[in-house]
Image: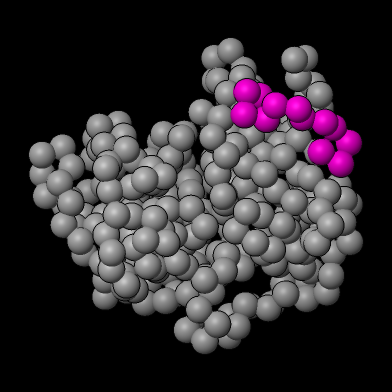
Amino acid sequence: MIFTKMHGLGNDYVYVNCFEETVKDPATLAVAVSDRHFGIGSDGLILICPSDVAGARMRMFNADGSEAQMCGNGLRCVAKYIYDHKLATADEEFSVPGQATFAHSLSIETLRGILTVGIDVGDDDTAAAICVNMGQPILSGPEIPVAINKETVVNEPITIAGLEHSMTCVSMGNPHAVFFCQTDVKELDLEKLGPEVENHALFPERVNAHFVNILGPNEMIMRTWERGSGITLACGTGACACAAAGVLAGLCERNVLAHLPGGDLRLFWHAQDNCIYMTGPATEVYSGVWPG
């Protein structure tokens, strides 16, 4: 099986072109290829599949084999792969309302629905900057889901590791719990806090946990414990969720630069269409052959 290793800000996945390859058991394969000692090494597996309703379809599996609804960094990489390898025809311009215009656009089917991606091309005619319309955030507690029956879950008290924390919850097609911290997030014991949040009784489908320092109305630093994968260098849906949570909590404006351990993402929560636009890079590292 031919695979390609790609990453978005260090959030790395093994990608398989299912226009040409067949993967019979993606959950088992995800566990095998993700192993950083005995496999390829990644945060999971992403399949790039044909679609009847879009340019392509993305399926994403965490390192533990569980299938996730969405992956923002993964989606940017899928868009780059589709464009660079000519799997689908790119359409004309893609505009972020009041912000920027990208030269090309693609539609990609996900478990979140059909999402539109804008692409700017570098001098070598490969996709460089990539912007994703991540859709509207889901804010209702039961729909996130979190076992708190409120219209929005903002600054909600929760006990983690014996201490009280304030939590804001958002879904971007997958559930996120966001904690705005006074202490430096780089000093947090994420190995301890992450699993406690992910598996907390409030979250029937588990949750992605994010710890955030607000640097100003348009800037934040975040660290992530990703559901099913653990500590990751970046989380695209999580960055979108943190941006929305910052607005809901009254801590930042709708246009935010998020600093993640693997690099930066630009987020814009548009007031008119209620969609969050995420802009960042995607990188193809290498291709190889998996013998299994």
Tell me if 86 is positioned left or right of 42 in this view: right
Residue 111: x, y in percent? 62, 54
Residue at 67% from the left image edge and 44% from the top image edge: 59
Which picture quadrant has residue 114? bottom right
Q: Position of residue 277 (x, y in %)?
A: 56, 69
For residue 81, above or below residue 100? above
The residue at 21%/55% (across/down) is 181
Q: Does residue 12 appear in the picture of this structure?
A: no
The magenta stretch spans residue 115: no
Question: Which quarter of the rendered picture does the N terminus lie within?
Answer: top right
What secondary structure characterizes most of the magenta part? loop
Q: Is residue 231 found left or right of 185 in the rendered image? A: right
Segment colored magenta: 18-29
Residue plotted at (77% across, 68% down): 105
x, y percent for residue 63: 53, 30
Residue 199 spot, x, y in % from top left: 32, 38
Q: Quadrant of the C terminus?
A: top right
Q: Is residue 258 left or right of residue 266?
A: left
Residue 140 appears in the figure: yes
Q: Residue at position x 52%, y 57% from top?
A: 173
